[in-house]
Amino acid sequence: MSHENQVELKQNTLITFPALFGLYRDNFLPKDVRIVGYARTKMDSVEFHKRATQYIKGSDNEETAAKIEEFKKISTYVSGSYEDAESFQTLEKHLREIESAYKGSERHRIFYLALPPSVFIPVAANVKQNNYSTDGVNRIIVEKPFGKDLPSSRELLSALKQHWSEDETFRIDHYLGKEMVKNILVLRFANVALSAPWDKNSVSNVQITFKEPFGTEGRGGYFDEFGIIRDILQNHLLQVLSIIAMERPVSFAAEDIRDEKVKVLRAIPPIEPSDTLLGQYVAANGKPGYLDDDTVPHNSTCPTFAATTLWINNPRWEGVPFVLKAGKALNEAKVEVRIQFKDVTQGIFKDISRNELVIRIQPSEAIYLKLNTKTPGLYTRALPAEMDLTYKRRFAEVKIPEAYEALILDAIQGDHSNFVRDDELDVAWKIFTPILHWIEGRSGPRPIPLKYPYGSRGPKELGAFIDKYGFKRSTEGYMWPVTNVS
Ligand code: BG6
């Protein structure tokens, strides 16, 4: 199986179908909804249902198992090519048969294209020509990669626009469906205590960090074409940055939010090589290095780790470094935003820790504010401690939805707020394209990434890199104590 097909299969069986099931189980799908899978693989419905439901969690629970059986009844499958119209006509016949069982004249269709980039445009065109409902709303959901740089993204965008309007298009960045990312807007704009110090006068630096404890095992061939910057920074982390940095939107309407995101992104100049640190993992602790993967070219200089600093040229953020860091094969799984405030005026205190607001996106969603407090007891020394909102403790009864559940529901409801608009994508590529071309050796010799051992914190040079942007570690060996609430 090709790498592209592996990615496609993983996306559908591991993510899309479990998310659809989650919505179905919790009664969020419209009553008459039907789900139709379409791909090249020929298989009967037993095999399709097996694949579609194999990664649904909790299937050993009786109630969930019964729901899965119901879910199978609303899901069918058609196999066909991605290129020829005839196959899409067969799909159309199948859709009409299903729809004919329902009274009423509206036939809304959402097409979810979790597909390899090579077949993306022919499928979008074929679906439009053969499967577009004339009696209802049509929407298309698309997944990254949206090109590889500014020119290729523009090409893809305009090819898609020939068939689908912006209003019909829902570009997924699944980080926008994560609960804590969605919370940033509320946290920022519903709290005077947080809005007031949210600027260059109070904030020293912002770090947005993505750490994964596993390498590119099994998808090295795919990854090597893209690298960590396209995989994580240019989309997921930049999206988080835009919500952290944007101005208050006029309303929560999708276009008001997206207007502000685009505005702040447009104030960010392209990243400089001098603001970049690249790494690639090597074998350690019995784990293979990136280059040990047979599907990766033996001399690949593709970064599996990157730290880049972005600057925002607007009055709120001028001079505040936003450091984006992401890496594969690191020491832990963690995604967080860390807003580090400036030093308190010196004089009565010496060497006290800085305030930090940490938004823990995953795992174990939390928001905590590091504060200095008097050491309890007969001392007057300041001690760093925290005000801690750990979700599993504070909202113990609440089930946090998966990102894809939230986004599919938004698409069903026609809400674009958490999807990437065309101009947003364009400006994201403008920021990253020069550095990507530099990494690919288009403007000189390719930079050689620093080595770091599998399972480590990244290249050892990272500490000095972050210090360069004014980051200061807490005193007294501070550690956030609530990392593992289960
Ligand atoms: C995907 C990347 O977009 O996000 C993967 O292609 C990465 O490489 C994944 O593993 C991370 O998503 P999450 O939701 O597990 O943080």
Image (spheres, helix red, strand yellow):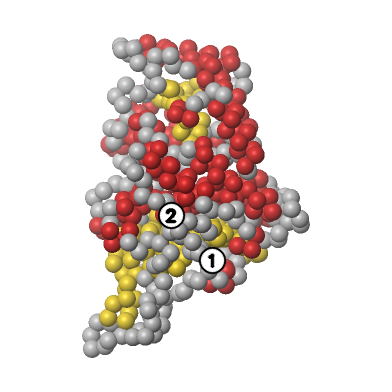
Residue under pointer 2: 245
Q: The C terminus appears in which quarter of the rendering?
A: bottom left
* Residue 425 drawn at (x, y percent): 53, 41
Q: Which mark is residue 457?
A: 1
Q: Residues within 10 Å of mark 2 (few under 14, many from 20)?
A: many
Q: Compare residues 100 and 429 and report the one nearer the observer.
A: 429
The amino acid on which the numbered mark 2 sits, given as a three-letter code, is Ala
Residue toward you, 348 or 178: 348
Up-down relation of residue 134 to residue 116 (above or below)? above
Q: Residue at x 37, y 34 (%)?
A: 415
Q: Secondary structure at mark 1?
A: loop
Q: Is residue 264 left or right of 288 when viewed as pictured?
A: left
Tell whether 149 sits left or right of 103. right
Please give the name of the residue rendered at 61% of the width and 36% of the height, measured from the top-left corner: 154
Q: Quadrant of residue 280?
A: bottom right
Q: Is residue 165 visible?
A: yes
Distance from mark 2 CB to nearest ligand 1 atom below 8 Å: no
Image spot of residue 485 (x, y percent): 32, 61
Q: Residue furthest front?
A: 315
- The single residue placed furthest to the right in the displayed view is 445
